[in-house]
Amino acid sequence: MSTQPTVHRGADAITHAFRRRNASGEKVFIPYIMAGDPDLGTTEKIVRSLSGIDVDIIELGMPFSDPMADGPVIQRASERSLRQGLTLKRLLEAVQQLRLDIDTPIVIMTYYNLFFCYGLEAFAHDAAAAGVDGVIVPDLPVEESEEFQKALDAEGIALIYLVAPTSTDERIRKIAQRARGFIYYVSRTGVTGLQKDVSSDLESNLKRLQSLVDLPIAVGFGVSTPEQAASISHLADGVIMGSAIVKLIGETDHMHEQVAAKFLSPIIQVLHNKE
């Protein structure tokens, strides 16, 4: 008698994604797309397509009027999405719909004001019910995160923290005590956006970070090619790609989901050792 595979949810789903790849000597791939760009229906199609090509975790951006951590590409996508009238409530409804046919962990990335206005406990409850596994809040410092952390912990949702090259050992240790799922390492100072080369101090910075935290580390901000992904994969547990995908979607007139999947296939092959 066959048994159904265990479906993990919340922080456990993210942890399982890293453990599964680590056990096979592979690396986790996390694509970022801006929800609602060009519209929410297309976002759902793209998410299903990404799940179908075996990405490990999907990061959904929720547009915000003042995205201080984002570069021009994601800012423009955010503006397009806002013109569509996307709200956090509608995004949760879309995630709930996606959960009818995909199990890939989903993380929402947006700014603290939106969660605060929604209500921290209300959001945590509704997000868990919808099937959200984690959240990333780039403007929420660890010193001010306790209230939201408690609300998310109560629902089993991971609060994923960002660490920058400028983060001190003391700050990293504070983050390590609270973080769930993985640590998001920002590969450079500044905002999101494509870059030609991996930072020269990435290896030394990651070694320092690895000495201070026990969680897996995924590297983002500026990754845009299979070569960059391969370089990072020798140093970290996962790779996050955003601006390159968002740029492609913004330049595509139709069949967004197929274009995105085709673009990402070489990167997935590198990280999952399927060359």
Image: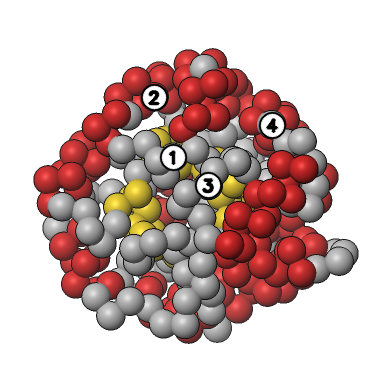
Secondary structure beneath disc 4? Answer: loop
Q: Residue furthest right?
A: 254
- For mark 4, what is the residue? 87
Measured in 3D between alpha carbons, the distance from the residue under mark 4 to the one under mark 3, in whole angstroms, is: 15 Å
Q: Is residue 8 above or below residue 120?
A: below
Q: Is 1 left, or right, of 170 in this rendering?
A: right
Secondary structure beneath disc 1? Answer: loop
* Image location (x, y in percent) of residue 5: 57, 41
Give the amino acid type for the residue marked by disc 1 in the picture. Answer: Val
Give the amino acid type for the residue marked by disc 2 in the picture. Answer: Phe
**CB under 8 Å between discs 2 and 4:** no
- For mark 3, what is the residue? 67
Give the number of the mark in front: 4 or 3.
3
* Image location (x, y in percent) of residue 227: 48, 83
Name the image quarter holding residue 156. Answer: top left
Q: Is residue 143 above or below residue 116?
A: below
**CB under 8 Å between discs 2 and 1:** yes
Which badge, 2 or 4, is on the more N-terminal residue? Answer: 4
- For mark 2, what is the residue? 148
Give the number of the mark in front: 2 or 3.
3
Task: Please name the residue shown 50% across and 30% down the image.
Answer: 113
Measured in 3D between alpha carbons, the distance from the residue under mark 2 to the one under mark 1, in whole angstroms, is: 10 Å
Give the amino acid type for the residue marked by disc 3 in the picture. Answer: Pro
Q: Is residue 128 above or below residue 170?
A: above
